[in-house]
Amino acid sequence: DHLVNQIAAGEVVERPASALKEMLENSLDAGARRITVDIAQGGIKLIRVNDDGSGIAADDLPLALDRHATSKIGSLDELERVATLGFRGEGLASVASVSRLTLVSRPHGEAHAHQIIAIDGTLHPVEPAAHPEGTTVEMVDLYFNTPARRKFLKSEATEYAHCAAAFERVALAHPGVEMILRHNGKVTARLPVQSLADRVGAILGRDFVDASLIVDSEAGGLTLRGLVASPTFSKASRDAQFFYVNGRFVRDKTAQHALRQAYRDVLHHERHPAYALFFTLDPAGVDVNVHPTKVEVRFRESQAIHQFLFHSVHKVLAAGAG
Ligand code: ADP
Ligand code: MG
């Protein structure tokens, strides 16, 4: 079943950035307030994520690398209203089956840390280690055991760009978490705990924030908060479309359509709108179980949601257009 794991892993770990996303989501689910990411050679050589989250008990280290073992969902019923970013229990198992993985952790309040190493799908025994409270996951040599897959990777620069994008998507939604990114030993992003506006400024540029309008609306259990580029902002591009559902970055047709229509209605042109928007709803109203990489979701009441998103943004743009 090592082969089965490797095949399944391909779904989850399409490229280094997918491994990074899994690790970052685990750190957030563990309640981290500080996350440090080290990447070497576009992530193909190394991705190391260190956090100060709740940690993993020594006895649970092998479980964390077990496929379908998750500490986050206890029943099928809970799957209906999943509140964590992870819930399948296949993130780390997938990364481990296509790399050399080291997991080191010290739970909060514990005096000692432990580590486990997985190489080519084989778990080595848990051993004592030195580590502050929190967890470090280190992935080395992605696809060293699946050379055919490795051939599909792009240049280091391209793979790094995907990693940086994955980092930014997470960072944008978590201004309360200090986040640092290094590539080949050089700091490429240092984000302190900051306000949402400052975090958006650090990632999308101060000019975006200065030329943006605030969205803050709520109706029938739905909320939409964040920033949309004002009608006068001219640098709008596809790259500035950040939409989150219950804290999860998604690309959603309903949302894209509603937002484009709001812009078109007010501005009468087809330019791509720019936004950083955070939408929340009752988790039971959205299916996040669509695909392992999870950038798609399915809404139960997509028409009502379309209307809510359209009106929330339309109102703000119309006021901004004066
Ligand atoms: P999932 O996130 O879907 O539960 P993963 O394979 O990504 O599955 O992780 C497996 C388990 O390992 C998690 O449920 C969690 O208990 C533990 N884990 C992984 N990373 C961390 C971390 N950074 N801090 C604390 N626990 C972690
Ligand atoms: Mg996970």
Image (cartoon, rainbow, N blue to C red):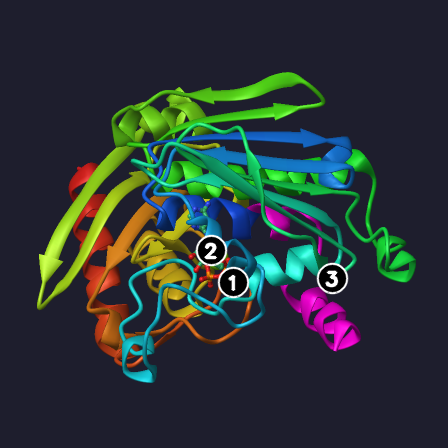
Q: Secondary structure at mark 2?
A: helix
Question: Mark 3 — residue?
Answer: 121
| Mark 1 residue type | Leu
Residue at mark 1: C-beta within 8 A of ligand 1? yes
Tag in front: 2 or 3:
2
Image: 216 above or below 73: above
Is 225 left, or right, of 129 in this rendering?
left
- Contact, CB < 8 Å: mark 1 with mark 3? no
Q: Quadrant of the N terminus?
A: bottom right
Q: How far from the left and from the top, in percent, is residue 235?
A: 48, 32
Question: Mark 2 — residue?
Answer: 59
Q: Which residues are magenta?
A: 1-20
Residue at 33%, 76% in the rendered image: 79
| Mark 3 residue type | Gly
Residue at 62%, 50% in the rendered image: 19
Is residue 28 within the magenta segment?
no
Is the stretch drawn in magenta largely helix, strand or loop? helix
Of residues 257 and 188, the one nearer the viewer is: 188
Q: How far from the left and from the top, in percent, is residue 33?
A: 33, 32
